[in-house]
Image (cartoon, rainbow, N blue to C red):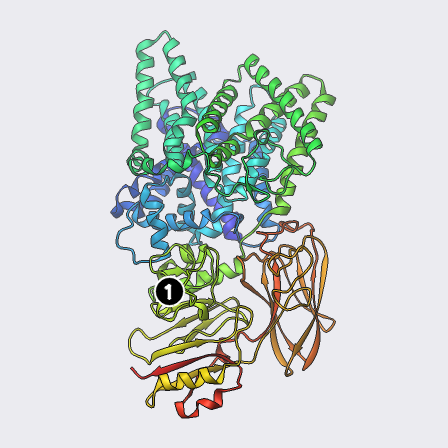
Amino acid sequence: MLTAWFLFPLVLGALALGCGLLLERAAGTTLPRPLLLPAGTATIIVASLFPPLFESTAPLATPLVVALAASGYALSWPFKRVRADVWAVGAGVATYLAFAAPVLGLWRRTFAGYIKLDDTATYLAMLDRYLGHGYNVAGLTSSTYERTLTTSLSTGYPMGSLMPLGIGHTLLGTDSAWLWQPWLSFLAAMLALGLYVLVRPLVHGRFLRAFAAAVAASSALLYGYALWGGIKEMAEAMLLVLVAALVVAFLRAPGPRAALPLAVGAAATLGSQSAAGVIWLFVPAIIVAVVLFRRPDRRGSIVAGASLAGATLVLAIPTLSAARMWLGHTGAFTGDTEYGNLYRGGQPHRIEWPQILGIWPAGDFRNAPVNGQAAGVLIAVVVIAAVLGIVLAWKRRGWALLAYTAAALVGMLVFWRFGSPWIEGKAFAIVSPLALVLALAAAGWVFESGRRVEAVLGAAAILFGVAWSDSLAYHDVVLAPDARLTELQAIGNRYAGQGPTLENDYDPYGARHFLRKLDAEGASELRVRPVYLRTGALPSTGESPDVDEIRLPDLLVYRTLVTRRSPAASRPPSVYQPVAAGRYYEVWQRPVTGGPRIVEHLSLGDRFHAAAVPRCSDVLRLAQEAGPTGRLATVDRPANVAVTLDGAAPGAPGRFGEIAGLVIPTSRQSFPLDVRVPTAGNYEIGVDGSFQSQLELFVNGKQVASARHQLNWPSEYNPLAVVPLRAGSNRVELRYTGPDIHPGSASTGAGFGLGPVLVGSSDAAQLQVRYVSPAQARTLCGKSLDWIEAVQSS
């Protein structure tokens, strides 16, 4: 936790400051002090894209950035001109904490957007490969990881926004997944620093500038996208402000060297957005061309303009090289039916244009505001104040703020007119700080002009609207189950190279990222080898089939199995042996060569019950299949208990808004259950599904466990506790506490529901294979078994 949230921004901030100082020295100019960190971040993006141009030099990205930062410090010694603006730093820190709050509120190393959007899993996979090999994906073994890269990285996907994250991962030795949210929060802080500079011509007071910058950077739509993992939206929002500020800085004293900071900002925009970056750079380019053309020093203007264009093209060489591949894969970004996961009420739905104004009080920005009338009044305040802000910026020569306004509006309109609904939504998020910063800059000017009551009331209304919107998003956030993913990470490291591997539990972050060194494939993920179910169908995306549901030949392809623990989960076939068991997962392996041959595997039980009593005719048939030299293999297993939260059998009609036999709790609720077990002993109790707020487990009147914020795809199991149960009836109760101060506590998660409660054993060590000769086959009749196999020696 310390590394992710505190060391990462310190390390990245130190690198950005060093690179910003170097950029300043190279340009022979003095940048506004708050712009050193954003400009340095842009320098990191640009520089880090050069080594991966060639696979052999790709690992040099981190050493290159460290060397540049060190050079910046060395050339700037003794730092007499580097004085921190305390209020600018305060704006950056406040913004960082605001974006970090949904994760810091649980004090866990995790990231937001889990299940809602699995793009982050793909980004992590691409970054893993790009750091060491650039765009080259040749030589990878068939796996979900390989399929992911073939359909994304090999197309020349723009990697600029990811590279500082990868450099932090390399230096700190922390998996990129745990640095994901700190990186997004860092970008938000850099955005605030840029906005702080933009409002200076209108607002002299540094506190008022810091207030305007921090609030505007936290605009509702951008905040919502950050809680989805919107890395390119955060990067471009920051770079758009930076470029606007650097345009004005360049035009004040244009020259060949002075063009370098703006060229870096432009190249970073292209590196993060590829061809789409040209749209955001169109207005800044026009401004530069017009101003240079109107200068009396025509020769100097030509030299300055040519230097800017040439430096930008040189610095954008990695992006231009990859664009040859990427431009052929952008068709989906212009289709009118490409909504991605922009849905409302189960139907595709565009982001609404008022959302660009920074206030949208809804837990999920795809939904309508919780109070449309109040939201409309607050948005109207923003509109009136923003118009005043534009007028004031013109009168007070706030050229950088006007350049930002023009670039943002023109870029947004282009994407609105020609982009798909999915891309349009991203553009709206990128420009959403604009109206807020204009409005708050106007409020600051009014305050300093002596009309303090009106200014305070207007600023307070805007602050309330943004805080209201962000607090709802905070309470609706969905966070990754860090303990479970950490277990997958440990498995991926421990058994690296021991594939091929099948992960039957659907989790894109497993197969695409954490298990990549195991050449893992998800049963219903991107894959090369088909995994058919015994019904003859393929698992649908998001499905987590039990190993007993998978056709035996398709299962035996894999040397290693990573399976989700559950009292209802079947033991893998007899050739597999357990090699590791954690709280959430078990690892099974079969011999690379040799071992017995399974002639036939008879599955028993169902989705909610691991065991059943076989028909005696099936047992005798398997004995004949095994033959006199073969054996029958089986696993003795008492039947587990599966109870829905209304006490009925799984699949029976339920209540509490039940979906497919599940409940979706949204407020404080209690679910009393009568659990009957045949014999006294220790039993594991858990529940399928997801829950966001705290879930408490009581057994015979005593609280034995509590947990919160456990997200799962459908039909995935959460262990709660191992407890002693008496023979016969036991009073079991689940209590859902409902919304509270914790992040995500008001959310229904992915809406996959909760239930049934599962009671039984999921200890792999207890699932020993027992062998019976065909002559003794009848001894298996009437017994509760996991499965039976006819086995012959190889």
Quadrant the C terminus occupies: bottom left
Spot the residue most to the top: 296
Quarter assignment of residue 703 = bottom right
Identified by mark 1, the residue type is Thr
The location of residue 180, given as percent across then percent down, is 48, 47
Q: Residue at x 65, y 22 (%)?
A: 443
Quarter assignment of residue 531 = bottom left
Q: Is residue 593 above or below residue 166?
A: below
Answer few, some or many: residues within 10 Å of disc 1's Cα (few below 14, many 20 plus, some between 14 and 19).
many
| Depth check, front residue: 142 or 662 | 662
Q: How many marks?
A: 1
Q: Residue at x 43, y 65 (%)?
A: 491
The location of residue 626, given as percent across then percent down, is 36, 85
The location of residue 52, given as percent across then percent down, is 30, 43
Q: Is residue 641 left or right of residue 519?
A: right
Observer able to see residue 681: yes
Spot the residue most to the bottom: 775
Q: Is residue 544 above or below residue 568?
A: above
Q: Is residue 196 left or right of residue 693?
A: left
* Residue where numbered disc 1 is placed: 501
Q: Secondary structure at mark 1?
A: strand
The location of residue 419, given as percent across then percent down, is 44, 31
Observer able to see residue 23: no
Quarter assignment of residue 520 = bottom left
Spot the residue most to the front: 617
| Depth check, front residue: 274 or 260 | 274
| Depth check, front residue: 300 or 558 | 558
